[in-house]
């Protein structure tokens, strides 16, 4: 629910040691690549050099993020539940505690925020009052020299998109907007592959259930 960048980096190195035999950036990247291949997630849209996402050399697309979320939520129910519990909850917990409180999104959006100067992101999944859960990823790239846009523009934009995804169409309540401050998170942020300029991409996808890892052994 909160950002733990040093823990994420150490996990990245540990995965490299366990899978590739070397606790390095290259080993961690290889471990992630192999995991994505097993899950059937497109790897051509990902360049990962650390675990925290703070490096500007990281690259990912909204397509890859939503594909990964879809696989996680559609696989083993226990794993999906643990993943959900690790995420911030809109209006209730973690880095999303002070966003969209008192709206249709409160308690129904489980997601991870992301920010470094020039990049703002929100990815996760939402549970509507009626219907199936949906995954989404909003990745925004903008000129890093333009300060204040993450709090003043991109977070409100992300909130509005989340409300539209839920089908509510309602804007954030004045109370929630007043409570929103420049509390910048620095989680697993990735620069979207959208080319130069202040472009962004939002993608939503409904997860499909896939066989659990145990059922795929030997295939």
Image: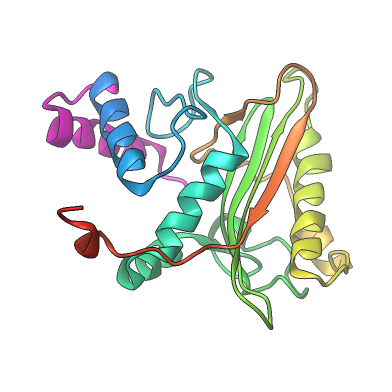
Q: Residue furthest front?
A: 219
Residue 63 lies left or right of residue 145; in this view the side is left
Residue positioned 80% across, 70% down in the render: 167
- Percent position (x, y) of residue 137? 63, 48
- Percent position (x, y) of residue 131? 66, 79
Q: Quadrant of residue 163?
A: bottom right
Q: Tell how many labels.
A: 0
Colour scheme of the rendered structure:
rainbow
Is 53 situated above or below 123?
Answer: above
Residue 61 lies left or right of residue 178; in this view the side is left
Residue 111 lies left or right of residue 167; in this view the side is left
Query: Would you say residue 89 is visible in this rendering?
Result: yes
Is 134 situated above or below 3?
Answer: below
- Percent position (x, y) of residue 107? 62, 74
* Residue range (magenta): 1-25
Residue 135 is one of the magenta-drawn residues: no
Residue 149 lies left or right of residue 128; in this view the side is right
Task: Give whichever of 57, 41 is nearer the camera.
Answer: 41
Residue positioned 22% across, 37% down in the render: 15
Q: Quadrant of residue 133?
A: bottom right
Residue 12 is one of the magenta-drawn residues: yes
Query: Would you say residue 2 is visible in this rendering?
Result: no
Residue positioned 81% across, 62% down in the render: 164
- Majority secondary structure of the magenta segment? helix
Residue positioned 61% across, 40% down in the render: 62
């Amino acid at each position: 629910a909160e950002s733990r960048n040093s823990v994420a980096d150490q996990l990245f190195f540990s995965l490299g040691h366990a899978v590739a035999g070397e606790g390095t950036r290259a080993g961690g990247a290889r471990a992630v690549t192999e995991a994505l291949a097993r899950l059937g997630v497109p790897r051509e849209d990902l360049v990962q050099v650390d675990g925290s996402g703070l490096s500007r050399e990281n690259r990912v697309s909204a397509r890859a993020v939503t594909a990964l979320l879809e696989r996680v939520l559609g696989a083993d129910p226990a794993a999906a539940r643990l993943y959900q519990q690790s995420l911030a909850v809109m209006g209730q917990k973690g880095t999303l505690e002070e966003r969209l409180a008192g709206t249709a999104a409160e308690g129904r959006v489980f997601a991870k925020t992301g920010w470094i100067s020039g990049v703002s992101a929100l990815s996760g999944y939402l549970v509507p009052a009626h219907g199936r859960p949906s995954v989404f990823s909003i990745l925004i790239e903008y000129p890093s020299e333009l300060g204040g846009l993450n709090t003043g523009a991109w977070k409100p934009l992300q909130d509005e998109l989340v409300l539209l995804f839920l089908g509510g169409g309602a804007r954030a309540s004045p109370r929630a907007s007043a409570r929103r401050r420049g509390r910048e998170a620095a989680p697993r942020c990735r620069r979207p592959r959208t080319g130069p300029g202040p472009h962004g991409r939002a993608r939503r996808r409904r997860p499909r259930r896939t066989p659990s890892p145990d059922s795929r052994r030997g295939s």
